[in-house]
Amino acid sequence: MMFAKKCPKCGGNVQTKSIKKSIGLGFVNIPVAQFCLNPVCDWYQDFAEAKEPEDIKEGFQIKVPSIKSKLSDFKKPHVSQKQIIVLAAVIVIICIYALSSYLIPVSHLPEVKPQQSDVPNTNMPLVNATQTPAVASTQTPAAIPDITDSKKYSVNMDIAHGFIPEAITINRSDTVIWINQEDQRPRIILISKENLFKNQIIQYTGDRFSYQFNQSGNYAFALAAYDPANHTSNEYPNIRGYISVK
């Protein structure tokens, strides 16, 4: 397969189609086909049918960039003679200063006396001539209230055993937590005989209700069974719990 400069069929101009592939620092143009520019001519040859690159007689070109163009980017910096003289003078001055500092003994250095500070001594008491003597306050300090740490107490309850413990003594601001331990009935009702709170329906085992006592006194509590059909409660007369608040 020969590389054609003119169309062998009609003698018209031809156009070469090539691809560019990089090789090292350069690249290679590889022609892959030629075709006639004459619109009525259908001449066409495909170089892809060539098995080896040397089968293509012309058009196989390798372009490698010039090394001089690469080296032109690395130009030597231009240093003038004046700049060299200034740099040498600076180096000489630095050497003389370092040598003189090393040879002069410390004892010959002038003594530097500390300067007196203009800031007044804050440790001395300040006397104000116009200041009137302080008058002792006749007001008595307010009484500090007695603050007691608030505590929490747990009371278990079920129909078979009542309140456990049955009676406890607490301080004001303490909190009592009633815990349902009933496993035979789905819910029970906790009743405050002094109406500290509304009747509390405590459902299922482990459910609980808490109340903080802020007033001193003696308080009684009862348990009742809940009737879901009539939404009523039947109090157990023999089950009582007692809390004394100091």
Image: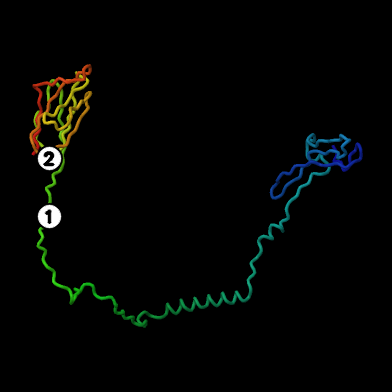
Residue in the image at 12% along x and 22% along y:
161
Residue, disc 1: 142
Relative placement, left or right, of 185 versus 90 is: left
Relative placement, left or right, of 195 versus 68 is: left
Q: Amino acid at mark 1?
A: Ala
Residue in the image at 11% along x and 21% along y:
236
Q: Amino acid at mark 2?
A: Arg
State the image quarter where residue 244 is shown: top left
Q: Quadrant of the N terminus?
A: top right
Return the x and y of residue 30 as percentages of the image width and height.
77, 42
Give the Cα separation between the discs numbered 1 and 2. Answer: 22 Å
> Which circle's residue, 1 or 2, is located before the other in the chain?
1
State the image quarter where residue 31 is shown: top right
The 10 Å Cα crowd at callout 2, few under 14, some 14 to 19, many 20 or more, is some
Work out whether 49 lies above or below 126. Answer: above
Task: Tell me the number on the disc at residue 172.
Answer: 2
Q: Closer to the camera, 41 or 7?
A: 41
Work out whether 235 lies above or below 44. Answer: above
- SS under mark 2: loop
Q: Are marks 1 and 2 in contact (CB under 8 Å)?
A: no
Return the x and y of residue 181 as percentages of the image width and height.
18, 24
